[in-house]
Image (tube, grey):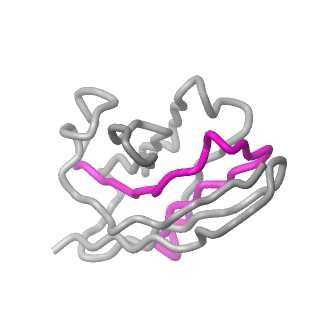
């Protein structure tokens, strides 16, 4: 059973930084793609970034490119999201997601494992 547990959310001022963690268990994730999505109040869940676990290839939404960095630690089975230069519009619940192989799109339904989410609030 795949389990994803996020941590690291909190309240930060605009321009600040946070690092989110996603601890993964229940599988060998070398053949998985891991992703971060976010959902702001009243909005749909949106794609933020993804990483292919074995190759390390990454892809970012335009809204976070140059500010956010996704990475993984093989020894700890953990994926990270380093968020810099945070803006109030980054406020959302951030979710870790996983799918075996490659996703067919940067959409919620292309991932079949999800964490419970962690709240990120950026004050202006």
First to last magenta residue range: 73-99
Which residue occupies the extreme top position in the image? 62
Relative height, residue 13 to residue 48 (above, below): below
Q: Position of residue 49 (x, y in %)?
A: 49, 39
Question: What number of labels is visible?
Answer: 0
**Residue 30 seen in render:** yes
In magenta segment, residue 20 = no
**Residue 38 seen in render:** no
Give left or right: position of 119 versus 98. right
Relative height, residue 77 to residue 102 (above, below): below
Give left or right: position of 66 versus 75. right
Q: Nearer the viewer, residue 24 or 20?
A: 20
Q: Position of residue 122 (x, y in %)?
A: 69, 54
Which residue sits at x=25%, y=42%?
101
Which residue sits at x=37%, y=42%?
42
Q: Position of residue 12 (x, y in %)?
A: 75, 62
Which residue sits at x=33%, y=66%?
115
Relative height, residue 49 to residue 9 (above, below): above
Specify the quadrant that holds the N terminus. Answer: bottom left
Q: Position of residue 67 (x, y in %)?
A: 73, 38
Residue 17 image-quadrant placement: bottom right
């Amino acid at each position: 059973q795949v389990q994803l547990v996020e941590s690291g959310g909190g309240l930060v001022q605009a321009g600040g930084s946070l690092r989110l963690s996603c601890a993964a268990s229940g599988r060998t994730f070398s053949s998985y793609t891991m992703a971060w999505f976010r959902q702001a109040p009243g909005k749909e869940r949106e794609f933020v970034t993804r990483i292919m676990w074995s190759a390390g290839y990454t892809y970012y939404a335009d809204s976070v490119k140059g500010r956010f960095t996704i990475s993984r630690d093989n020894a700890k089975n953990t994926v990270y999201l380093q968020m810099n230069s945070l803006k109030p519009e980054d406020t959302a619940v951030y979710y870790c997601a996983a799918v075996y192989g490659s996703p067919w799109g940067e959409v919620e339904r292309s991932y079949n494992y999800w964490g419970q989410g962690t709240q990120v609030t950026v004050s202006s």
